[in-house]
Amino acid sequence: MKSVLRSIFFAAYCVLMVYPFAHAGAEIYDGPAISVFPDHDKIGKSYSLKKAVADGKRLFITKFNVADGAGRPFATEHGFPTRRSEPGPSLQRIAGPDASSCAGCHNQPKVGGSGEFATNVFVAAPQFGTTLNESINAAFANERNTRSLWGIGGIEIAATEMSRELIRQRDAAMNQAHKSGRDVEVKLTAKGVSFGSIVVTPDGDLDSTKLVGVSPDLVIKPFNAKGTVVSIRDFTVVALNQHHGIEPLEMFGEARTGFKDFDGDGVESEFSTGQTTALTLWQASLPAPNNQGFQKHPGFKLFKQIGCDSCHLPAIRLESNVFREPNEFNREGVLAPSDTKNVVHMPLPLERDGNGYVIHAYTDLKRHVMCDDKRNYFCNERKKQDKVPLNEFMTSRLWDLNTKAPYCHRGDCTSITEAIEAHGGEAARTTDAFDALPRKDKVTLVQFLKNLGSREALR
């Protein structure tokens, strides 16, 4: 990997030698804004979890400056370390960097929440070459509204457990096919959610043409609109680079890329493994919206009656409440358990009932076809993310609708009613059923949804 990256970026490196960092000749008298330096290997041991979580919040609200390494003149926002051959802007709303702090976007109704339309981001990445993305045209960028982070620690636990279930079923089918000498088809389910089926041959080949809602690796990726990010840490590593021009060492450091200062901004060690861990742990610790008593609202019965709960599952049961960092399914370039001797275990205060732990997130953590010829709101994208079909989206979490406006993937649905009416594809029957309800029932259902995750639950 190191040798490949070195050869690919040699030309860019030569340019860097003659194009010094804009601030390299001037001392920044303010000093760096980053003020906490946790060591990953000590977190949960000699460095308490409580202190690491507090450090994470401090990092989340820090307004990074150039002395911290903010900006990425010679790097793009691509999730894979990618250099450009000519410098990019220090701040740019379209391709980034586009924010000074994480809290600059995640702040509704308070730090860790969602964001207004004004904080939308554009998912696009010029990979190799000199052209910067400067267009919001759907052919070049997918526009995304800032999502709330409430309860995402429990979401990651649920996704990890579901991934394990699916992989166990696949592996059992492979063993059966090998022993029987015949093809084996297995229907895949996790937490009661169906993901279609796969066919395994005695030689171990896999036919995934009947698989739905998840990628062939069978790893549930619960984060972002397309369901392509497996963990809070993965999201954080990419976001630090994309939105702030802060490069975490685990992905952009010399050991992986061969460059001490990958983005060419004059700062070599911008964000340590421990700082990334602390930032991840704080996000994971954010409480889930409290929706106790939701079943008593008359709108909940209507929610189930028209079939909303077929995708927006009111409850997902968990085997454990322990958040483990790093995640066992992290991709290359993001810290994995095999990369460290310290896997941090952080119990979360999840809701309990007679059957164990439960989260009321109103999602099945599955991708669905969301548009058709009649309702084509979700058919507005033209740029694929990680090979996910353009018309598929991850089922949104509804448990924080009270504080989440605006709605939908672009944040251009100003009301819950608009968001409901935008649902096509696999949700078309449910939308038709909503349209057929008497007006008073529509109002009751929408009021139920608007009540989810009330402000009082987040105090």
Image (spheres, helix red, strand yellow):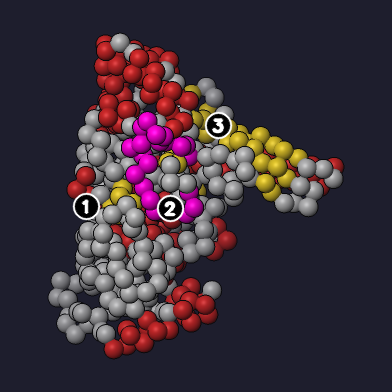
- Identify residue for label 2: 384
Seen as rendered, the residue at the extreme right is 180
- In primary-sequence order, the first of circles 2 and 1 is 1
Seen as rendered, the residue at the extreme front is 373
Q: Tell me the amino acid under the disc marked 1.
A: Gly
Neighbourhood count class around disc 2 (C-alpha, 10 Å): few under 14, some 14–19, many 20 upward: some
Magenta span: helix, strand or loop, mainly?
Answer: loop
Q: Nearer the viewer, mark 3 or mark 1?
A: 3
Asked if residue 323 can be seen in this view, the reply is no
Residue appearing at x 38%, y 21% in the figure: 432
- In primary-sequence order, the first of circles 3 and 1 is 1
Neighbourhood count class around disc 1 (C-alpha, 10 Å): few under 14, some 14–19, many 20 upward: some
State the quadrant of the C terminus. top left
Residue 304 position within the rendered picture, expressed as x and y whole percent measured from the top left: 43, 18
Depicted 372 relative to depicted 254: above or below: above
Q: Quadrant of residue 427?
A: top left
- Identify residue for label 1: 104
**Helix or strand or loop: what does disc 3 sit on?**
strand
- Residue 193: which disc? 3
- What whole-number distance in Å separates the C-alpha atoms at marks 3 and 1? 36 Å
Q: Tell me the amino acid under the disc marked 3.
A: Val
Residue 369 or 46: which is nearer the viewer? Answer: 369
**Helix or strand or loop: what does disc 2 sit on?**
loop
Q: Tell me the magenta residue range.
A: 367-388
Q: Quadrant of residue 37?
A: bottom left
- What whole-number distance in Å separates the C-alpha atoms at marks 2 and 1? 27 Å
